[in-house]
Image: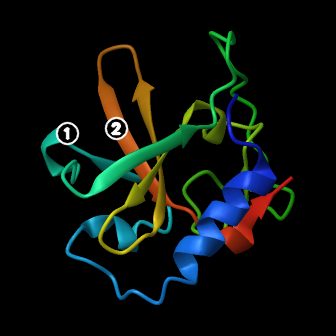
């Protein structure tokens, strides 16, 4: 079962309450979606926690959720687990700073683009 919005928010709040200052990884600065090359992914610090991808759904919706007029690349964009790109994400926790991070891979016609975004619990909506 994938995480629901309530569970994601709780996990993010636990990381936000940790009081640990940012670690050496760059992901604590990823308030909006950040593209990265696979060699920049701090695999030694990140532990996969769960997924937001629904089981048995090969092609989840590409519909985005921006009721306040935000955009995909806005740091203020809400995190809606039922909408793109969150519905294609795996959830990771940094073992050093305890922050929660979402990761998905964008597949275009001729490219692969790995993207990550830190989870701000205040932006997670049901």
Query: Of label 2 and label 1, which has the lower sequence position?
Result: 1
Image quarter of residue 123: bottom right
Q: Quadrant of the N terminus?
A: top right
At a point 38% along the width and 73% down the height, the residue shown is: 29
Q: Residue 67 got which mark? A: none
Q: Note whether 56 is above or below 96 in the view shown.
A: above
Q: Which residue is mark 2?
A: 114
Residue 89 in picture, x, y percent from top left: 54, 37
Residue 109 in picture, x, y percent from top left: 38, 14
At a point 29% along the width and 22% down the height, the residue shown is: 111
Q: Residue 38 got which mark? A: 1
Q: Note whether 50 is above or below 70 in the view shown.
A: above
- Whether residue 90 is visible, yes or no, is no
Towards the viewer: 2 or 119: 2
At a point 66% along the width and 55% down the height, the residue shown is: 71
- Whether residue 39 is visible, yes or no, is yes
3D distance between C-alphas at marks 2 and 1: 7 Å
Query: Seen in the image, is 1 located left or right of residue 104?
Result: right
Image quarter of residue 115: top left
């Amino acid at each position: 079962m994938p995480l629901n919005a309530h569970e994601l928010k709780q996990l993010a709040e636990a990381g936000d309450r940790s009081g640990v200052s940012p670690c050496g990884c760059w992901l604590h600065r990823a308030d909006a979606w950040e593209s990265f090359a696979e060699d920049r992914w701090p695999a030694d610090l990140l532990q996969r926690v769960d997924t937001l991808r629904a089981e048995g759904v090969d092609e989840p919706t590409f519909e985005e959720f921006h009721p306040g007029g935000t955009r995909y690349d806005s740091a203020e964009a809400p995190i809606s687990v039922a909408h793109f790109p969150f519905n294609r994400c795996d959830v990771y926790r940094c073992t050093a700073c305890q922050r929660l991070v979402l990761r998905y891979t964008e597949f275009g016609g001729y490219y692969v683009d790995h993207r990550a975004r830190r989870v701000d619990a205040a932006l997670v909506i049901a």
